[in-house]
Image: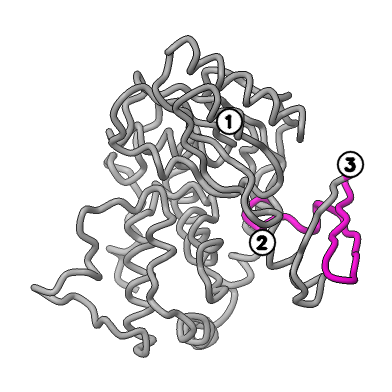
């Protein structure tokens, strides 16, 4: 990791010193372990604060929309897929973007760390190969790094950036095709069981909209939930039906555009299983249209194209 961090620093410093870019967006160390925080470096000296570790989980594509000037971004696989999707939606000018691609095997989920430490605060983490040593107050535990990764990272099939201007590190082996096992399991439940699960999960929602704000492809100038005239949806989080409506509309809006980066679920302070919905749409779009968001610069957005033989099962009366 330190070698990658040094390479990222060198690349950023060179770009800024040669004035090839005005800004480099990457990660700096957070105030706590596994809390990598976005860094906006405008000078080589500021770029010296850049780092790379298993806590650099945020999707930095979120900071690139409609940005003026020449910008470089440190981007892992899911970030780059979101960038590609946003370029196609004219939210990012590819000519003004320099991508420092970083192959990524996954980021550590702090919730899984907390569970292992029994809720005690993590003070330090040491990674040696595939093993992590977690140190808290008067406690120390070891775990396999693979067991600590975010579920979105475990499901990710695009650890390598699909496009880049400069690659830092070595490309990773390709992964097998996603089998969507947990989605198929959910689909096998009865309607009543699925409804009960949705009610249980979204009764926890506090409508903070962190999921929306963390999503790279959620960028409407005015979200429907914020409208007062007309008021499409109630404002109280006490109404589970409205909470479900908000999430269903949000997810449908990202159909064919979501890259399954997991930013929404990571941002949720209530631990709601939001990826159950987003991955269901990712699976459906792949099966219905043989399309995945952000995997190349050539494919048109799945829901922005039409052919006469497109599947239309919703028009068939059972």
Secondary structure category for the residue under label 1: loop
Secondary structure category for the residue under label 3: loop
Q: Residue furthest top?
A: 18
Mark 2 vs mark 1, foreground winner is 1
Closer to us: 27 or 57: 27
Locate residue 184 relative to residue 228 in the image: left or right.
Answer: right
Percent x, y of residue 230:
10, 74
Q: Is 209 rendered above or below residue 109? A: below
Is residue 291 among what the camera can see?
no
Quarter of the image containing the N terminus? Answer: top right
Which residue lies under the disc numbered 3?
129
Mark 3 vs mark 2, foreground winner is 3
Locate residue 241 relative to residue 190 in the image: left or right.
Answer: left
> Quadrant of residue 28 in the image?
top right
Numbered label attached to residue 181: 2
Locate residue 127 relative to residue 263 in the image: left or right.
Answer: right
> Quadrant of residue 85 in the image?
top left
Percent x, y of residue 197:
54, 83
Closer to us: 15 or 252: 15
Secondary structure category for the residue under label 2: helix
Which residue lies under the disc numbered 1?
161
Q: Residue at x 49, y 50 (%)?
A: 287
Quarter of the image containing the C terminus? Answer: bottom left
> Quadrant of residue 91 in the image?
top left
Is residue 99 rendered magenta in the image? no
> Which residue range is magenta in the image?
128-153
């Amino acid at each position: 990791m330190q070698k990658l961090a040094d390479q990222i620093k060198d690349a950023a410093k060179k770009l800024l010193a040669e004035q090839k870019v005005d800004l480099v967006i990457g990660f700096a160390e957070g105030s706590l372990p596994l809390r990598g925080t976005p860094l906006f470096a405008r000078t080589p000296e500021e770029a010296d604060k850049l780092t790379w570790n298993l806590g650099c989980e945020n999707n930095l594509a979120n900071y690139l929309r409609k940005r003026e000037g020449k910008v470089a971004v440190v981007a892992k696989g899911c970030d780059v897929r979101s960038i590609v999707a946003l370029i196609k939606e004219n939210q990012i000018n590819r000519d003004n973007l320099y991508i420092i691609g970083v192959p990524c095997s996954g980021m550590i989920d702090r919730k899984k760390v907390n569970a292992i430490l029994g809720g005690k605060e993590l003070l330090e983490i040491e990674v040696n190969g595939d093993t992590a040593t977690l140190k808290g107050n008067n406690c120390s535990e070891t775990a396999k790094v693979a067991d600590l990764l975010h579920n979105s990272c475990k499901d990710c099939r695009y650890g390598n950036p699909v496009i880049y201007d400069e690659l830092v590190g070595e490309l990773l082996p390709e992964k097998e095709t996603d089998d969507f096992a947990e989605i198929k399991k959910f689909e096998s439940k009865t309607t009543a069981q699925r409804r009960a699960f949705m009610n249980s999960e979204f009764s926890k929602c506090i409508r903070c909209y962190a999921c929306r704000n963390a999503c790279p492809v959620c960028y409407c100038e005015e979200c429907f939930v914020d409208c007062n005239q007309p008021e499409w949806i109630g404002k109280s989080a006490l109404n589970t039906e409205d909470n479900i409506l908000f999430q269903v509309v949000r997810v449908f809006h990202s159909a064919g555009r979501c890259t399954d980066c997991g930013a929404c679920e990571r941002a949720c302070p209530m631990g709601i299983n939001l990826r159950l919905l987003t991955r269901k749409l990712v699976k459906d779009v792949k099966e219905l249209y043989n399309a995945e968001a952000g995997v190349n610069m050539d494919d048109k957005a799945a829901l922005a194209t039409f052919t006469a033989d497109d599947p239309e099962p919703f028009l068939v009366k059972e």
